[in-house]
Amino acid sequence: MRRLLPACPTDLGRPTDLGRPTDLGRPADPAGADTSWDPDTLEGLAAVYAYPGPTGPGRPWLRANMVSALDGAARLDGFSEGLSGAADKRIFGVLRALADVVLVGAETVRSEGYRPARAREAFAEARAALGQAPAPAIAVVTRSLDLDLSAPLFTEPLLPTVVITAESAPAAARRAAAAVTDLVVAGDEQVDPAAAVRALTERGWTRLLTEGGPRLLGQLAAAGLLDELCLSLAPLVTVGEAPRIMHGPVAAEIQRMELRSLLEEDGFLFARYTRPS
Ligand SMILES: NC(=O)c1ccc[n+]([C@@H]2O[C@H](COP(=O)([O-])OP(=O)(O)OC[C@H]3O[C@@H](n4cnc5c(N)ncnc54)[C@H](OP(=O)(O)O)[C@@H]3O)[C@@H](O)[C@H]2O)c1
C-alpha cells in the first residue's frame, strides 16, 4: 500500500496532532522513523485512522466508512461486496477495531447479513488501555423493527446490540426487541439522527463509526453530524441506478471537508476527510 498523503508524518495535520497518543496508545513520531507509520502494517494503518483526541467532554466523533465506484455507485448487484477489495477489507477491520460502536441502518443489516463485531487479539491491549470493550457494539437504526432477533447479531454479541427506533414502531415488535437488545426510542415518527447519536454518547461511547447505508448516512450528514468520511474509491465503472454513498434530500448546508490522508493499493484510493479544524 502506498501512502500518497501525507508524504511524511510531519505533514499530518496541525502540529498539535504530533506527539499526541494515537488510539493504539503510542505517540505519533514527528521524525518519521517509527515503523508504525507503515500502512502495510496493522499498527501503521491504525495510526493513519486514529481517532482524534477528545474534542470536548463527552463529545463524540462520528466517522463514516463507505466504498464507492468511480461513477459514484454505492453498491454492485445489491451489495457493497462487489466494490470492495483486500485493502478495503483491511481498513474496514481496522476502523471497527478502533471504534466504540458501529451505527448502521437496518437495510444494510438485513441485506449484508450483519453479525456481531469480533474481538481481535492485535487490538486487545490498546482497547483495554483506552477503556474500550474488546469489540465495538453494533447499533441498528430501524422504524419497522423488521429484524431477525434469533440471528447471532442479537443472540451472540460481546456487547448487547443497540436497536434505535421511533415511538411509531409497532408495539409488539418493540416488546420483542426490548427483551433481547438494548432498545432506544429516539424520535416520534422516525428516528432523529441527533437523538440517536446522543443515545450512543450517553452510553459512554465517543468513537463512533457508521457503515451507512446511504439512506442513514444521508440523514446523519444532512443533520451536520458527520465529522469524518473514510472513503474507499474502487477503480470500477459500473453505470446503473445504484445510490451514491449518501442518499436523501439535499442538505440545507453544504459541508466542506478537508483531506487528511490518502492511500493507494491496486488502483483503489483510500481517502480520509474530516470537517475543517
Ligand atoms: N457502499 C457502501 O459502503 C455501503 C455501505 C453500506 C451499505 N451499502 C449498501 O446499501 C444498501 C442499503 O442501504 P440503504 O441506504 O438502502 O439502507 P440503510 O441506510 O442501510 O437502512 C435504511 C433503513 O434504516 C432504517 N432507517 C434509516 N433512517 C431511519 C430513520 N430516520 N428512522 C427510522 N429508521 C430509519 C429504516 O429501517 P426499517 O426499514 O427497518 O424501518 C430504513 O429502511 C445495501 O445494498 C448495502 O449493500 C453500501
Image (tube, rainbow, N blue to C red):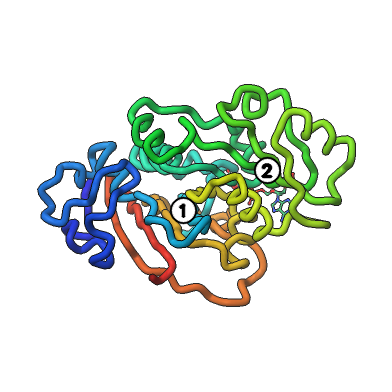
Q: Residue at x 42, y 37 (%)?
A: 97
Does 206 sit left or right of 12 as displayed? right
Q: Is mark 2 within 8 Å of ligand 1?
A: yes
198 is higher (above) or lower (below) than 110: below
How far from the left and from the top, in percent, is residue 102? Answer: 54, 43
Say if 104 sits above or below 259 in the image.
above
> Residue 216, can we see it?
yes
Q: Is the distance from the Cβ of mark 1 to the nearest ligand 1 atom less than 8 Å?
A: yes
**Number of disc labels:** 2
Using residue 75 as the reference point, say whether residue 232 is left or right of it: left
Quarter-of-image position of residue 10: bottom left
Label 2 amino acid? Ala
Q: Give the residue at x 37% y 57%.
A: 272
- CA gap between label 2 and label 1 equals 20 Å
Q: Please state which of residues 253 and 246 is positioned toward the viewer in this rendering.
A: 253
Read off the residue under disc 2.
Answer: 106
Which corner quadrant holds the C terminus? bottom left
Q: Position of residue 201 (x, y in %)?
A: 58, 51
- Identified at 63% across, 31% down, the residue is 160
In this view, the residue farthest toward the right is 171
Would you place residue 137 above or below residue 258 in this image?
A: above
The residue indicated by pointer 1 is 68
Which sits in the foreground, 55 or 95? 55
The quadrant the N terminus occupies is top left
| Kind of residue indicated by mark 1 | Ser
Q: Sequence-wise, which precedes: disc 2 or disc 1?
A: 1
| Badge 1 element | strand
